[in-house]
Amino acid sequence: MANSERQADEILALQSIFDRTFRLTNENQYEILIEFDLCTSFTIQLDNKISTVQYLPPLSLIINYHDEYPSDHPPSFILSCFYFSKIDLEKLSQKIDNFWFIRGEVCVYDWIELIKQEITNQFIIRTKEVFRNRLQSCSICIDIIPGIDCIRLHRCGQFYCRTCLNHYIRMTLENGKFGENLLCPQDHCKQVLLPTEIKQTIQNEKLYERYERLTLQHGLESMKDIVRCPR
Ligand SMILES: [Zn+2]
Ligand SMILES: [Zn+2]
């Protein structure tokens, strides 16, 4: 098969895979916007401002075909993305350059997979590390503590030091509040603490079992169609 046919086939395939993020700019050149799946959101702190990241803007990959692709050489490409430094983009380009090219075989889809993988490994994990090592301030005692000793509530993003949150949970449990009534300590915050957050904070099996038992019991009582077994 001639190079031009293989190129046309690859364009058709990529067009059907990437659909609205694929754009043909001229007959030898196209742009693909590469999107990233963040399975969980994460928090970053920049200039004392804490933000939760749930979505990353796409990275742009421009591919330029030439007469010797795919028979002899890979196509040329340009990567651009505003939140990566020039060095990061150069490193990523180098990885693509070093990617094993098989003569006669198209490679753009594999490149995209490589880019996604690299970005998840490098950028996202590194950003999480930044959070863990940065200092955070507890919303109760206002102490400054390293991110790693801090608990960030998943539902509202509030930070607490383990000591304060532990104290709060124990007090609240003693006052007979559990399950859907165990809310984030922040005034006016109506978010419920997750069972995993409670477990991680109190680190006390017995107390946690009590919390689970009370929550279950309460849940069952609130279901009208359940009748207690008399035995
Ligand atoms: Zn605290
Ligand atoms: Zn909250």
Image: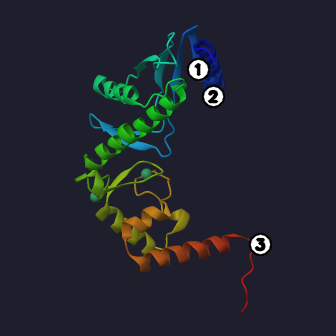
Residue sitting at the far right: 225
Residue on which disc 2 sits: 17
| Quarter that holds the C terminus | bottom right
Tell me if label 2 and label 1 are in contact, CB under 8 Å: yes
Q: Which residue lies furthest to the bottom in this view?
A: 231
- What number is the disc on residue 125? none
Query: Helix or strand or loop: what does disc 2 sit on?
Result: helix
Relative placement, left or right, of 181 versus 231 is left
Q: Which amino acid does label 2 sit on?
A: Ile
- First of labels 2, 3 by sequence position: 2
How many marks can you see? 3
Q: Which residue carries the number 1 mark? A: 22
Q: Is residue 112 above or below residue 125?
A: above
Quadrant location of residue 226? Answer: bottom right
Image quadrant where residue 163 sits: bottom left
User: Nearer the viewer's eye, disc 1 or disc 3?
Assistant: 1
Image point (64%, 15%), residue name = 5
Judge by depth and name the residue closer to the eye, 19 or 195. 19
Q: Which amino acid does label 1 sit on?
A: Phe
Marks 2 and 1, how far apart at CA: 9 Å
Q: Where is residue 96 in the image (x, y as percent from the top left)?
A: 40, 28
Front disc: 2 or 3: 2
In space, the residues marked 1 and 3 are separated at their CA atoms by 54 Å
Provide residue 220's location: percent of width, then percent of height: 66, 73
Q: Which amino acid does label 3 sit on?
A: Asp
Give the residue number, with chain letter if any, for mark 3: 225
Q: Which of these two is toward me, 133 or 27?
A: 27
